[in-house]
Amino acid sequence: MRRGSQIPVSLAFLAAAAAAFVLPDWMISLATIAFANGLVVLGLIVMWRAGLVSFGQALYYCVGAYTVALIARWSGLTDALALVLIGGLSAGVVSFVLGFLVARYREIFFAMLSLALSMILYGVLVKTESLGSTDGFSVVIPTFLGYAPHQEQLVLALYWLVLAVCAIAAALIHAYFHSLAGALAVPVRDNEIRLEFLGMSVSRLVHTKLVISGLLAGAGGALAALVVGHVDPNMSYWTTSGEFVFITVLAGAGSVGAAFVGSLVFESIRSLAFAIIPQLWQMLLGSVLLLTILFLPHGLGSLLGRLRRRLGAP
Amino acid sequence: MLTVFAIFADGLVYAAYLFIVAIGLTLIFGVMKILNVAHGSFYTFGAYGAATAVGIYFDRGLPEAGGFLLMILFAMALGLALGLILERGVMRLVYGRDEVVMVLVTYAAFLILEDLVMLVWGPGSYATYQPLLAAGNIEIGELVLSNYDLGLILVAAVLAAASYRGLKFTRYGRLLTAVIFDRETAAAFGIDVKVVYTVTFAIGAMLGALGGAIMAPKISVTLGIGVEVIVLAFAVVAIGGMGSIEGALVGALIVGICRAAAVHLVPQVELFVIYGVMALVLMIRPYGLFVRAQPRKI
């Protein structure tokens, strides 16, 4: 991995931001939600590099979303930046606290415990009548530092907000991957005991990764809540987590950009499937997942790498 | 006092149901180290199969006992076919990959099978109450119990005893135990692990379908019933220790009684008491109640 590989990603983000002037509204909406979910996937990639797969990432997604919705409802705060920040941080705090429990587990047990925790939140939300039970409730229309756009302007403003958050997150995570703590992910996956013998604390490394991915999932959930304008308990259901894991597999853990590319591809496949074969979209998704695992074990990201090598090689 | 009895009776019935659903899952995990998300699909197919069989058989005035038999046989045949297709067609290709990758493969299979159910049986729901009516009720003191529920407990008990006996005292059971302990050594001693895998997966699938068939009369057979079952069965298996049949039994009893107690005493927590118990057990015993300590590999 070269240090300069951040430039294409930045260019891609700028291009995506500029594309808003030519793309139709429905495409922008699709891309907005895809990028917001891409944040969650980025968090999963952080963990996946250390060999951890969470089947309960929807927990933090849901915490972020509900925090935004509740804060806006109770305090009247409508500023999107502040809301997303609070949403992300609250999920980060939750992941920090739960991390003391979850960081002790690996492999399937890690996945299962995360799943159980997210299902507890789901159960609590479904049983809480004051939060709309299974229906959830709607989220305020956000403002941006005093600017209060409507209709098309709102769609655009949210799109750029999501892109900006994603770009910042991508840069930070890229830096993290190249830091010592980030580089130790692969040794954690391969052999923890050796790493302990070298004087590193594996549980602290894993705990850090949990908090990072919690922050990212929380920010993703917060953005999704603002974009969709509605929150409901299904955000914490295990199938939501399953979708995020699905996108992670599709994307591959190779690079930061892969998370967003994977998420875009996933949303496109889903919209396409809904439009063409509404009855069978799960079958299509399942087939894509299966084919990806069988024929593209390192995800779409590996295709990019292969392409880059072919172009770069003399 | 009545509440205590009711909790006990309901808990036992629910535990029986959980055990029947979880035993196939834990068997497949124990032998093959696959956490099989498609187990929910086996359950769904079993339930739909049973609904179809009941729809064909009852209302014709034939003896009722035959209806029960047909319902279960038809569902298990479906499970067998599905298990064989999945194992031979898909799982075989990913043996040896990461455990998590295999979970994802079964998740993909689950997604595909969910829609397949809708293709075959349509989006409507099926009522399959006839066997429940045919079984009738029994009164014990003030408590009214359905004979069908008692039958459920009996089936679970028979399954538990049969799997215990099968694993400990039959030739195939001994081979299976060897594979569970150490796949490579077992293979080195001439056990055909491939065949063991195929047979185990097929048996697990049949057990999943059996769970669906048995539950069909008690629920409305409709789309999406497999989704919840998967996480429930996961919780039971995780509490007991993955791959352990005693564990599945104890896990089912714990979860069953806790849920029944919650339903009767504090109905608000019913939805998440199961996962609460699971998180609690895993905090104390990280790998479940009945699981062998794994040697650390350096």
Image (cartoon, rainbow, N blue to C red):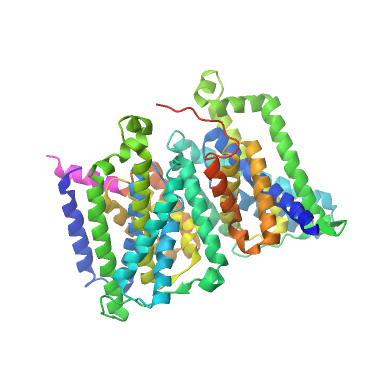
Q: What residue is at 56 percent from the left and 31 percent from the top?
A: B292
Q: Quadrant of the N terminus of chain B?
A: bottom right
Which residues make up the magenta segment?
Answer: A301-314
Horizontal side of residue A279 vs A88, given as left or right = right
Horizontal side of residue A9 vs B248, given as left or right = left
On screen, residue A151 above or below B5: below
- Give whichever of A13, A104 is nearer the camera: A104
Q: Residue A79: horizontal and vertical position, in percent?
A: 31, 74
Q: What residue is at 42 percent from the left and 58 percent from the top?
A: A60
Q: Residue A75: horizontal and vertical position, in percent?
A: 39, 76
Reply yes or no: does residue A307 show up in magenta. Answer: yes
- Give whichever of A234, A14 is nearer the camera: A234
Total numbered badges shown on the rendered structure: 0
Q: Residue A125: horizontal and vertical position, in percent?
A: 52, 65
On screen, residue A140 above or below A185: below
- Give whichever of A70, B152 is nearer the camera: A70
Reply yes or no: does residue A271 show up in magenta. Answer: no
